[in-house]
Image (tube, helix red, strand yellow):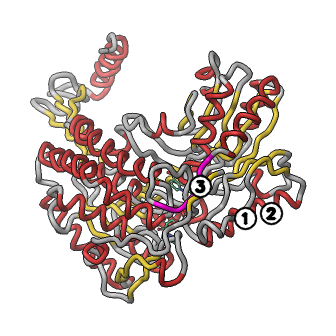
């Protein structure tokens, strides 16, 4: 592994103070620090927190702004989204800087965030218009009933996000909510508020009217509950534990929610896979964003026939990775996002090794490179009694397992309480195996980016990995209430004139039979 240390003094974020002023403040200040340094050297800026008591009023004022926004033609909203995408690409260097400095990731992972915003902006500007268009349906009585389905905005959407993809998860999920005519109140993780505020500046500069998107700052346990109490829909991304609590709170209020939660994502390397391609793909799938990716791979099931060759190729590639803290493009893997994350990853590996796991590569923290650095780590001989066998590590740690058949690989991949993402490597049987894997997205001959980047198709989790979907038509219609308006002309839906109820029932019965036999419109 080649390595790079963070510069002694971190680059200054020129706009940190300007971004901080965009927060809904009023409470004590929060010091934002970079995981690339320690103490005073790490400080990136100060952001005022939002007192819990202000949250209700902020949501109310967003609701007022939303009433006007709902009247803005969908075409005009789409034009703003297009400008968000263009501006994100134009400002990519500054956005990548803040994402990297706040979260510690390498530049390529930060670039993926900016591109995700640009892709979603372009997709929802185009597909959002079609999805929101009123749809005519055949009415209760042919000719006499004219029925149209509409989609009305929910009102104010609360978005609560974690620290791992601080730009993507804040902005990309807000865009369809705004496109659908809602206001957004965003609560980013307290470790990454500057990125969220840079995202707010981006959408405002692209023309989003003032007041429609607000960023509140503070601890989830303090300002999360009043936010969930006040909004009309909740889009949550984070841990399964928090997701369960918040889904319960939404259930109490009978508001809708989308829960994008954790995973313990499997990769299957079948006997006919191209081993070198699979090994290169595994590096991307396991170690992008230092493994702090909800869709990253933490378990690899490899067919016996190719196990030795795959493991050798994978380990060789991991050994060749460059590791470090810095804004250069040539660093393959950056830091973990916090000491808390470093401790959690270290604890999983220590527990596994104590119970007999073999470290094939990595397995150590690297304080010489930065306070939160951990090596990309591949483990073998992982058994059920080890915590990381089933728990999400959310770091650069993956276990490899030898399997005897496709059947066994699929069965073991599915033996998890999660079902977020999966990856299958095979020359010929990829799609067939993928169809039998129980996960919201399955990538064939890629790790996660093929499905994630397909913004037109839904993305989300089965089982403990969540509820609801982002991307695709579902990713925008969830932010709307469906409303059916049916206009009845001429006669009512009742016996006409002197017709008896019994006769009416006979006529209707025959009519429904006729309708049932009518050829379906394609
Ligand atoms: P977390 O649940 O601890 O925190 C996520 C957000 O929720 C933060 O903003 C936090 O402040 C807030 N929060 C915490 N407690 C709250 C409460 N009681 N009320 C309201 N808000 C509260 O998650 P984390 O550990 O910081 O993030 C990592 C997790 O996120 C991993 O499990 C990862 O898999 C998951 N994740 C999922 C996806 C996805 O798309 N499925 C994407 C990224 C991350």
Position of 154 compared to 218: left or right? left
Mark 2–mark 1 Cα distance, whole angstroms, equals 6 Å
169 falls in the magenta region: no
Q: Is residue 228 above or below residue 423?
A: below
Q: Secondary structure at mark 1?
A: helix
Image coordinates of residue 379 in percent, x first then y, are: 78, 48
Residue 336 vs 472, above or below: the answer is below
Q: Name the residue at 49% across, 38% down.
A: 449
Residue position for label 2: 350
Query: Which element is circle 3 on?
Result: strand
Q: Circle 1 is placed at which residue position? A: 346
Crowd rating for badge 3 (residues with CA inside 10 Å; few <14, some 14–19, many 20+): many
Instruction: Examine the rendered structure and indicate whether residue 497 appears above or below residue 88.
Output: above
Q: Which residue is mark 3?
A: 323
Q: Which residues are magenta?
A: 321-326
Q: Identify which residue is drawn at 30% across, 22% down.
A: 508
Other-residue count near label 2 (Cα within 10 Å), few / some / many at <14 / 14–19 / ≥20: some
Is residue 50 visible in the rendered image? The answer is no
Give me the C-alpha separation between circle 3 and circle 1: 17 Å
């Amino acid at each position: 592994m080649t390595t790079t240390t963070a510069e002694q003094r971190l680059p200054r974020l020129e706009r940190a103070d300007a971004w901080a002023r965009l927060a809904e403040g009023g409470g004590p200040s929060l010091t934002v620090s970079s995981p690339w340094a320690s103490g005073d050297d790490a400080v990136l800026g100060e952001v005022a927190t939002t007192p819990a008591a202000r949250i209700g009023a902020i949501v109310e004022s967003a609701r007022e702004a939303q009433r006007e926004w709902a009247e803005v033609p969908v075409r005009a909203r789409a034009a703003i989204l297009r400008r968000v995408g263009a501006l994100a690409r134009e400002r990519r260097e500054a956005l990548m800087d803040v994402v990297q400095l706040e979260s510690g990731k390498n530049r390529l992972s930060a670039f993926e965030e900016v591109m995700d915003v640009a892709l979603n902006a372009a997709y929802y500007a185009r597909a959002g218009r079609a999805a929101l268009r009123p749809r005519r349906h055949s009415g209760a009585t042919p000719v006499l009933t004219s029925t149209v389905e509409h989609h009305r905005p929910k009102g104010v959407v609360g978005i609560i996000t974690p620290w791992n993809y601080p730009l993507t998860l804040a902005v990309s999920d807000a865009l369809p909510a705004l496109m659908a005519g809602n206001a957004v109140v965003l609560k980013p993780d307290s470790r990454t508020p500057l990125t969220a505020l840079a995202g707010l500046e981006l959408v405002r500069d692209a023309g989003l009217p003032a007041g429609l998107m607000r960023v509140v700052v503070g601890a989830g346990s303090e300002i999360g509950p009043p936010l969930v109490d006040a909004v009309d829909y909740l889009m949550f991304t984070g841990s399964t534990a928090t997701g369960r609590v918040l889904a319960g709170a939404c259930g109490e209020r009978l508001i809708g929610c989308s829960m994008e939660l954790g995973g313990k994502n499997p990769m299957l390397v079948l006997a006919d896979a191209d081993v070198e391609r699979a090994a290169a793909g595994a590096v991307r799938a396991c170690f992008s964003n230092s493994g702090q990716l909800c869709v990253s791979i933490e378990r690899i099931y490899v067919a016996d026939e190719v196990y030795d060759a795959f493991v050798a190729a994978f380990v060789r590639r991991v050994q060749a990775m460059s590791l470090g803290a810095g804004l250069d493009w040539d660093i393959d893997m950056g830091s973990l996002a916090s000491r808390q994350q470093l401790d959690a990853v270290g604890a999983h590996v220590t527990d596994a090794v104590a119970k007999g796991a073999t470290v094939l590569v990595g397995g150590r923290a690297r304080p010489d490179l930065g306070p939160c650095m951990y090596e990309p780590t591949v483990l073998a001989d992982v058994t059920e009694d080890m915590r990381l066998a089933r728990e999400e590590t959310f770091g650069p740690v993956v276990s490899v397992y030898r399997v005897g058949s496709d059947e066994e690989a699929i069965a073991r991949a599915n033996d998890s309480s999660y079902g977020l993402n999966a990856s299958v490597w095979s020359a010929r049987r990829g799609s067939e195996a993928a169809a039998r894997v129980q996960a919201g997205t399955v990538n064939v001959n890629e790790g996660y980016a093929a499905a994630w980047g397909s913004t037109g198709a839904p993305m989300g989790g089965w089982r403990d990995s969540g509820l609801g979907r982002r991307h695709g038509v579902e990713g925008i219609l969830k932010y709307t209430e469906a409303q059916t308006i049916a206009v009845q002309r001429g006669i009512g839906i009742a016996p006409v004139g002197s017709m008896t109820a019994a006769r009416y029932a006979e006529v209707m019965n025959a009519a429904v039979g006729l309708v049932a036999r009518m050829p379906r419109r394609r």
